[in-house]
Amino acid sequence: MGNNAHITVRPLTASDRAAWDRLWEGYLRYYETELDAKVYETTFARLLSEDPNEFHGLLACVDDRPAGLVHYLFHRHAWKVENVCYLQDLYADPSVRGKGVGRALIEAVYDAADRNGTPSVYWLTQDFNHTARALYDRIGVKTPFIRYGRA
């Protein structure tokens, strides 16, 4: 596949389960994480929900083959009247990295946020994720926040 690959981004459908499983497993493997089958089932069901307050999922297809995924969620924010958009998971298959899949997925989330009247989109990454951060530095703005979790 050359740089002239045709990338389309579309909503996740029930018939995408096998492709989503493959991409989701790749994403989790990158972060050295394994999840129970129950989490797979629950997450996929949430992504297909018609509830606007639930997670949304998109697939990026390169030459009609699913090659990347993104999950995002609209939620309330105490400092804003409108909702904000959290881009939780973003993954491009290693075979298509550098071809524009990640950018296409982020831009699709930006478009969804605009259609939803949600101008603020944010996401997190690990500091060692240098390849992704090179893209994020071009398409987003790094904030000074540091994330903490419950001990």
Image (cartoon, helix red, strand yellow):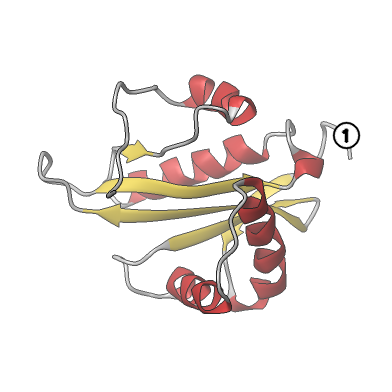
Q: Amino acid at mark 1?
A: Gly
Q: Quadrant of the N terminus?
A: top right
Report whether residue 68 is seen: no
The outermost residue toward the front is 151
List x then y, in percent, for residue 90. Answer: 55, 46
Residue pictured at 73% horizontal, 36% vertical:
97
Residue pictured at 56% horizontal, 44% vertical:
105
**Left or right relative to 69: residue 98:** right
**Left or right relative to 18: residue 11:** left
| Image quadrant assignment for residue 131 | top right
- Whether 34 is drawn above or below 3: the answer is below
Q: Secondary structure at mark 1?
A: loop
Q: How many marks?
A: 1
List x then y, in percent, for residue 31. Answer: 59, 47
Residue pictured at 39% horizontal, 22% vertical:
142
Report whether residue 86 is seen: yes
List x then y, in percent, for residue 68. Answer: 66, 51
- Whether 80 is drawn above or below 60: the answer is above
**Left or right relative to 57: residue 102:** right
The outermost residue toward the right is 1
Label 1, residues with CA under 10 Å away: few <14, some 14-19, many ≥20 = few
Residue denoted by label 1: 2
**Left or right relative to 82: residue 133:** right
Residue pictured at 61% horizontal, 55% vertical:
28
List x then y, in percent, for residue 5. Answer: 81, 40
